């Protein structure tokens, strides 16, 4: 999931440099959403991993 977020971020940056503001905005929004979902799932997996090890 993190790789998808990085991919969309790169697409957004390239589109922003080329002047495609609509595509750049959409790509960076998708990248931000995927990154937040990744962080939430990562924290949940850390909490569950520690809980089962006890």
Image (cartoon, rainbow, N blue to C red):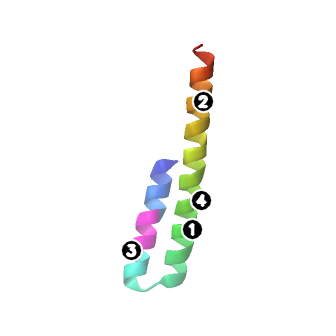
Mark 1 or 2, closer to the camera: 2
Q: Which residue is mark 2?
A: 47
Q: Residues within 10 Å of mark 4 (few under 14, many from 20)?
A: few
Q: Residue furthest bottom?
A: 19
Residue at the location (38% across, 74% down)? 14
Mark 4 and mark 1 in contact (Cβ < 8 Å)? yes
Mark 1 and mark 3 in contact (Cβ < 8 Å)? no
Callout 2 secondary element: helix
Q: Residues within 10 Å of mark 3 (few under 14, many from 20)?
A: some
The span shown in magenta is 9-14
Q: Residue 29: which numbered mark, if any?
A: 1
Callout 3 secondary element: helix
Mark 3 or 2, closer to the camera: 2
Q: Quadrant of the C terminus?
A: top right
Q: Which residue is mark 4?
A: 33
Earlier-in-chain disc, 3 versus 2: 3
Residue at the location (57% across, 24% down)? 49
């Amino acid at each position: 999931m993190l790789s998808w977020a990085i991919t969309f971020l790169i697409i957004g940056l390239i589109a922003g440099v080329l002047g495609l503001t609509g595509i750049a905005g959409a790509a960076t929004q998708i990248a931000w959403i995927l990154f937040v979902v990744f962080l939430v799932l990562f924290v949940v997996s850390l909490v569950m991993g520690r809980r089962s090890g006890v």
